[in-house]
Image (cartoon, rainbow, N blue to C red):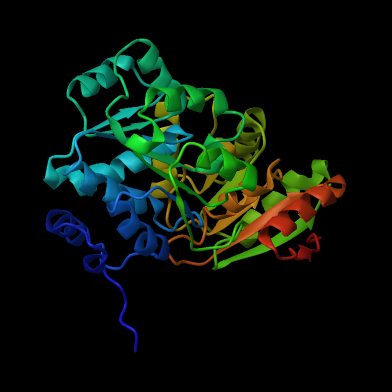
């Protein structure tokens, strides 16, 4: 019988291993098992794995270990504040006993504490692109010592929305030959892979799930429904599935309105979107995690930043504009080996969008009859 790999088998330094053992990490996930040894060796790599499979440790462990021997800083770039806060929490938990100093640079919070953290000469900087550039332009830091660069959710980071900002960041860090670069994401379209490779040296590709693979234990169904009937259908489904539920809308205004409608249905609900302050977003997420709110209504800003175990149902009230976002959204349920269910509402004129999603995930989605 094959014995299960442990973290001790991956070439991790004793001090770091002790930290992982204390936090009850024993067996690596497939992406961790493949990426950690390569990362520790200093190789550039592109890691493709589903959401919820432990990508943070897959790049965090090699970065922390290498920074103990390689003079310089680690830099982790992420698309959303929520994701940055989660990654910071993992780094702090693992690196605390090793004296690791971490600075987090995100919008929505004051510059003062961030400047203080930078003066403390952090080993690792975790940042969203916009705020990192603010600090660069105001000369609060330079990135000449960034010897290990990680782009998490790299497909979103390298799409056109962030491209100009990333161009400035790549210009500020040492050239590819003088740094290690690691990219991680659940999806990696070919054009993004081409851009990524131009900023890396001989990257190795580690793919533990084919492109667009959805989480294994999530069941999926579709309702073809008119726009005006969506709210009533959601009301019925919230009664049918009395579980912790994450609902995705396309717009900030839509999220706010829908959360109000759900509260009118006598369910506890809160919304999270770009117009809310960082404090409000943290409060909403904490309330959802603790069970204070049964329903969290979110825009795509949160699709890649919600790491909550126990979400029983994800509802795509509005279909995402990008098929790749479908994978990220439904990956919020069935995390850490648990089961989950995903329901999507498609309007009659969106059958083409459904076909694009089915092509990406390589399976046809069952269409259910609307309950009377």
Image coords of residue 238 (percent x, y): 62, 54
Name the spot of residue 82 as percent of width and height, x first.
43, 37
> Which quarter of the rendering shows the N terminus?
bottom left
Give the residue displayed 63% in from the left and 47% down from the top: 190
Image quadrant containing the C terminus: bottom right
Q: Residue at x 68, y 43 (%)?
A: 322
Q: Residue furthest right?
A: 349
Task: Tell me: residue 122, above or below residue 355.
Answer: above
Pick the front one: 69 or 363:
69
Q: Quadrant of residue 215?
A: bottom right
Residue 299, quarter of the rendered image: top right
Q: Is residue 293 left or right of residue 175?
A: right
Q: Is residue 304 left or right of residue 175?
A: right
Q: Residue at x 56, y 28 (%)?
A: 163
Task: Indicate the position of residue 277 as horizontal and vertical percent values.
Answer: 45, 24
- Give the x, y percent position of residue 359: 74, 58
Closer to the camera in the image, 254 or 191: 191
Q: Quadrant of residue 63?
A: top left
Q: Residue furthest top?
A: 138
- Asked whether residue 108 appears in the rendered view, the answer is no
């Amino acid at each position: 019988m094959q014995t299960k790999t442990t973290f001790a088998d991956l070439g991790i330094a004793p001090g770091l291993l002790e930290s992982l053992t204390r936090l009850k990490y024993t067996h690596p996930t497939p992406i961790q098992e493949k990426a950690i040894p390569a990362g520790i060796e200093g190789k550039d790599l592109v890691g493709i794995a589903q959401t919820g499979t432990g990508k943070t440790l897959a790049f965090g462990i090699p970065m922390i270990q290498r920074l103990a021997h390689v003079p310089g800083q680690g830099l982790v770039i992420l698309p959303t504040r929520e994701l940055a806060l989660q990654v910071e929490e993992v780094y702090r938990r693992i690196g605390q006993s090793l004296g690791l100093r971490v600075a987090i640079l995100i919008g929505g919070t004051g510059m003062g504490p961030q400047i203080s953290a930078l003066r403390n000469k952090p080993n690792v900087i975790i940042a969203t692109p916009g705020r990192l550039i603010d600090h660069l332009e105001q000369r609060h830091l330079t990135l000449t010592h960034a010897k290990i660069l990680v782009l998490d959710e790299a497909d979103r980071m390298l799409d056109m929305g962030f491209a100009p900002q990333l161009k400035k960041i790549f210009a500020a860090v040492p050239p590819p030959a003088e740094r290690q670069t690691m990219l991680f994401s659940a999806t990696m379209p070919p054009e993004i892979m081409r851009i990524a490779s131009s900023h890396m040296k001989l990257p190795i590709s580690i793919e533990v799930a084919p492109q667009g693979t959805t989480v294994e234990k999530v069941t999926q169904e579709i309702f073809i429904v008119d726009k005006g009937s969506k709210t009533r259908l959601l009301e019925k489904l919230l009664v049918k599935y009395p579980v912790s539920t994450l609902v995705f809308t396309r717009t900030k205004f839509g999220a706010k309105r829908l959360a109000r409608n759900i509260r009118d249905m006598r369910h506890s609900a809160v919304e999270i979107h770009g117009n809310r302050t960082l404090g409000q977003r943290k409060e909403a997420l904490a309330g959802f995690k603790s069970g204070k709110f049964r329903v969290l209504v979110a825009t795509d800003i949160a699709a890649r930043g919600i790491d909550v175990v126990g979400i029983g149902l994800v509802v795509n009230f509005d279909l995402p504009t990008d098929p790749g976002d479908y994978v990220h959204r439904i990956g919020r349920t069935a995390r850490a080996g648990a089961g989950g269910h995903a329901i999507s509402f498609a309007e009659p004129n969106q059958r083409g969008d459904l076909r694009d999603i089915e092509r990406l995930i390589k399976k046809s989605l069952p269409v259910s009859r609307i309950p009377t």
